[in-house]
Amino acid sequence: MRVYYDRDADLNLIKGKKVAVIGYGSQGHAHALNLRDSGVKEVAVALRKGSPGIKKAEAEKLKVMDAGEAAKWADVIMMLTPDELQADIYTNHLHANMKPNAALMFAHGLNIHFNLIEPRSDLDVMMIAPKGPGHTVRAEYLRGAGVPVLMAVHRDASGNAHDLCLSYGAAIGGGRAGIIETTFREECETDLFGEQSVLCGGLVELMKAGYETLVEAGYAPEMAYFECVHEVKLIVDLIYEGGIATMNYSVSNTAEYGEYVSGPRVIDDKTRAEMKRVLADIQSGKFVKDWMLENKVNQTSFKAMRAKCASHPIEEMGAKLRAMMPWIKERALVDRSRN
C-alpha cells in the first residue's frame, strides 16, 4: 500500500479547478473551508433550497448553489451528503448537468462499489476519505497538521485522475499526515465492518451491556457510567497514541491481567463467528440492500432504533455527569451551530 505526502502532490491542479462540495455537514464544511484556505479560489457548496447549511456556508463567504447549478459550473464535484441520498442526487441533478470530462469524487465507496450510482463514462471517478470526522479534519488543518486520508481511483477517463485526486487530498490537509492509496471495495467493506462490529455497533453495545450489568447488580449508576463509558476515552487515547502495548504499559498490572483473563470470555469464538457473518452480509451487499430498503419506507425502523438508543438511562446519566466536567464542553469537537 503506497503512501503519499505533500511533496508528492501538485496543489496547482486543484487550485485551477472549480470545485463544488455537495453538502455542508461534518465533512462538507471541512472540505470546503480547507480547500478555500489552501488557495482554491473557486469553491462552491451545493445545498437544497431551505437547507440550514446555507446560512452557515454563507457566513463563511462561500458561494452556495443548488446541485444542478453546481454540476453545470464545476470541474470537480465532491459528494458529501449521506450515503442514502447520493444516488437520487446523482440521477436527478448531476448526470445530465455535469460538464463533459469532469471529475466526480466521494468520501466513501458505498454507492460506487455497490453500483447504486453508475457515473457517465466520460467522468473521472475518485475517492478521498479522511480517517476522522470532519470536525477533526478542520481542526487539524487549522493547527497546521492534517488527518490521514485514503485515496482511490475507480475510473481514470482523463488520464489525470490519480494526480488530481492526490492534489485534492493534499488541499484538505491529508498530505501533511499521509495519503494512503486503496480501492473503493477495500475502503467500503472495511469501513462498514469496522463501524458495525467495533467502532459504533460493537463498542456501544459493550458499554451498554457493562453499564446494565453493574446497575442490575445494585451498583450506583454513576459508578457504572464512569467505569463502563466515561473511562473508555482514557483507554482509547492511550491506544490512539501508542497502540495496545502503550495502553498496557500505562494501566495497572491488575488491569492488564484482567484484560488477558477476562477479555476472551466476553469476546469469544461465538463473537468472532458473528463478526464473520456481519462481514459476509457486507460483502454480499445484503446490508446495503437492507439499508436502502429502509430508506424507501422513510427510515421507520431506523428512527425507532435511534429513539430507543437515545432514551437509554445511560444517556441521562451521562448528561448529568458531564455537567460536572465543564472542560468537556469547552474542548468539544462538535459545534452543531456551525457545522
Image: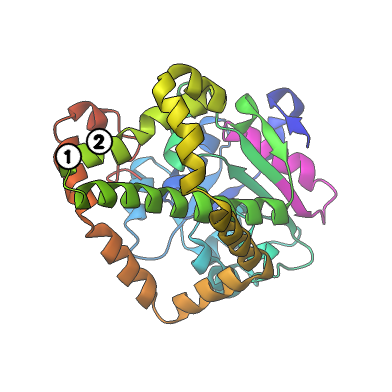
Say whether residue 121 is left or right of residue 283.
right
Which three-letter amino acid code belongs to the residue tagged 2?
Phe
Disc 1 marks which residue?
A: 222
Q: Quick one: 98 or 332, which is closer to the camera?
A: 332
- Contact flag, marks 1 and 2 (Cβ < 8 Å): yes
Q: Quick one: 19 or 338, which is closer to the camera?
A: 338
User: Which residue is found at the position 43% from the left and 59% from the top?
Assistant: 47
- Is residue 158 one of those drawn in magenta? yes
User: Which residue is found at the position 68% from the left and 25% from the top?
Assistant: 6
Could you say where residue 335 lies in the image, as x and y percent from the top left? 30, 41
Which three-letter amino acid code belongs to the residue tagged 1?
Glu
Q: In the rendering, which numbered label is found on residue 131? A: none
Q: In which quarter of the image is the N terminus?
A: top right
Crowd around label 1: few <14 · some 14–19 · many ≥20 (10 Å): some
Disc 2 marks which residue?
A: 226
Q: Quick one: 297 or 142, which is closer to the camera?
A: 297
- Mark 1 lies on a secondary structure that is helix
Going by the picture, which residue comes out furthest to the bottom? Answer: 297
In this picture, which residue range is highlighted in magenta?
Answer: 152-173
Please tell me how many numbered marks the rendered image carries: 2
Could you say where residue 34 lies in the image, as x and y percent from the top left? 51, 35
Could you say where residue 260 lies in the image, as x and y percent from the top left? 51, 33
Is any atom of residue 2 visible in this view? Answer: yes
Could you say where residue 15 lies in the image, as x and y percent from the top left? 64, 36
User: Does 204 appear above or below 117?
Assistant: above
User: Which residue is found at the position 58% from the left and 36% from the top?
Assistant: 40
Is any atom of residue 79 visible in this view? Answer: no
